[in-house]
Amino acid sequence: MSDRRNRKAKRPFWVELPILLVVAFVLTFLIQTFIAKVYYVPSGSMEQTLHGVSSGGDRILASKIVYDFRDPHPGDVVVFKGPDTWAPEADIPGPSNWFGKLLQSLGSVIGIAPPNEKDFVKRVIAVGGQTVACCDDQGNVTVDGRSLVEPYLYEPLPFTPGTQDCAVSPDRQHYESERCFAPYTVPAGQLWVMGDHRSESSDSSFLCWGLTPEEKAYQAANVNGDGCNRPIPQDNVIGKAIFIVMPPSRWHTIGDPDIDPQAQALSAPASSAVPAAGGLLLTGALRGGWALRPARRRARRARRAARRAAQEAS
């Protein structure tokens, strides 16, 4: 009777397969909606950290819960919804019929569809309250006057100290190097983001390349009214890019280096204070132990000498 019940209860494979597919799809949808989602890198603006569509197109996993516990930090690679004033970086034609659009919508749930033209991937350079500018004498971006260390940069705009640098050109409107842009204090609740492929990145600094403060002020008053700086609202951040999931040859984590060496140096004494204090305590303990040893030895010798003297006297 038990075997009969088992055979009766067992569903045929053609019935179980659709159920399993639906369950897997629902779980994937829930995970990518609330926990993490796979995104297609839309452009080459993050080369060589991330490959864009033109060089294969990485799929990256973006965590949606990291920033529930902390704010974005300088150095983080983030996925965000582009503001309305940002033009799409990827020009990929979408499907024209309803079936293709349906497949694209389903594919976007599991990260296999072409990139959304409004989703961007950039690196956080400065946060609200910080002042960002370019450049120092060596062509580095500065934040609050401190030069950043950015080993991930790829094909930055030309900069040659002494010739093609941040000296103001004779027209008083431009710097000698397009890499330079005037200081800008990021408003609270916003982020200054830039691509690792600086010469091909439409980012927060893109419209300000090479413009002096006077020219920026003129354009803000007479051209667009908003100025050339383009910070993004922190609320537009979708998640933190943490891993490259496709193709398999590119599997690795996406780092978030500490790009401010001075801030790192300032935090070092606090972290090294415990080892230093521990070292002093350990040294003191060892020295105290060695200091006690001669006294103990003398006491033992005195006891031995007393025993010998007693034996000889007897």
Image (cartoon, rainbow, N blue to C red):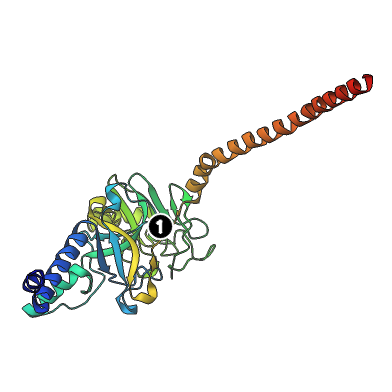
Task: Give the percent coordinates (x, y) of residue 113.
Answer: 20, 74
- Residue occupied by mark 1: 256
Q: Residues within 10 Å of mark 1 (few under 14, many from 20)?
A: some
Q: In this view, does 44 lie above or below 267?
A: below
User: Residue at position x 89%, y 20% from top?
Assistant: 310
Task: Give the percent coordinates (x, y) of residue 191.
Answer: 31, 52
| Element carrying mark 1 | loop
The front one of 212 and 108 is 108
In the rendered view, does 239 fall on the left or right side of 152?
left
In the rendered view, does 203 fall on the left or right side of 177?
left
The front one of 186 and 289 is 289
The front one of 270 and 153 is 270
The answer to whether residue 197 is seen in the rendering is no
The front one of 8 and 48 is 8
Task: Give the percent coordinates (x, y) of residue 176.
Answer: 45, 64
Q: Quadrant of residue 106?
A: bottom left
Task: Give the percent coordinates (x, y) of residue 138.
Answer: 52, 59
The answer to whether residue 26 is seen in the rendering is yes
User: Residue at position x 10%, y 69% from top?
Assistant: 2
Q: In this view, does 246 lie above or below 219?
A: below
